[in-house]
Amino acid sequence: MKSIGRFLSIHVADWSPTEKKQVPVGTGAIDWKKLFAAAKKAGVKNYFVEMSLDLMKPSVPYLKDLKV
């Protein structure tokens, strides 16, 4: 059975609670494998990655290699 939620899109950004700032995706507090699995099950279709180029460069390889 396919689950469809009320959210079609999510904004992808990671956070470091120790540094108290945004960090490259995959280096912060968020468990991306669990988040993307839950988003897929909920029917999320759009993922927006919006950050500075300094954060984007290390985030892209992490996201490309992530297996869900």
Image (tube, grey):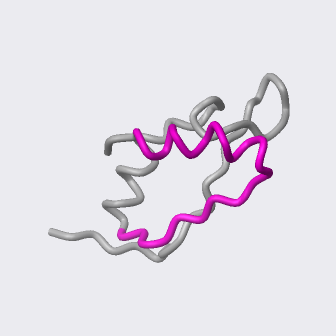
The quarter in which the N terminus is drawn is: bottom left
Residue 55, compared with residue 41, is above or below; it is above
Residue located at (48% from left, 75% from top): 8
* Residue 15 in picture, x, y percent from top left: 72, 38
* Residue 34 in picture, x, y percent from top left: 41, 42
* Residue 37 in picture, x, y percent from top left: 35, 50
Residue 52, compared with residue 55, is above or below; it is below
Q: Any magenta on residue 25?
A: no
Residue located at (21% from left, 70% from top): 2
Quadrant of res 40 = bottom left
- Asked whether, in this view, residue 57 is left or right of residue 22, the answer is left
- Asked whether, in this view, residue 65 is left or right of residue 20, the answer is left
Residues shaded magenta: 43-65
- Asked whether, in this view, residue 37 is left or right of residue 2, the answer is right
Q: Any magenta on residue 63?
A: yes
Residue 4, compared with residue 66, is above or below; it is below
Residue located at (61% from left, 42% from top): 59
| Name of the residue lying farthest toward the top | 18
* Residue 44 in picture, x, y percent from top left: 42, 69
Instruction: From the viewer's side, name the closer residue of 30 and 65.
Output: 65
Residue located at (31% from left, 60% from top): 41
Residue 52, compared with residue 31, is above or below; it is below
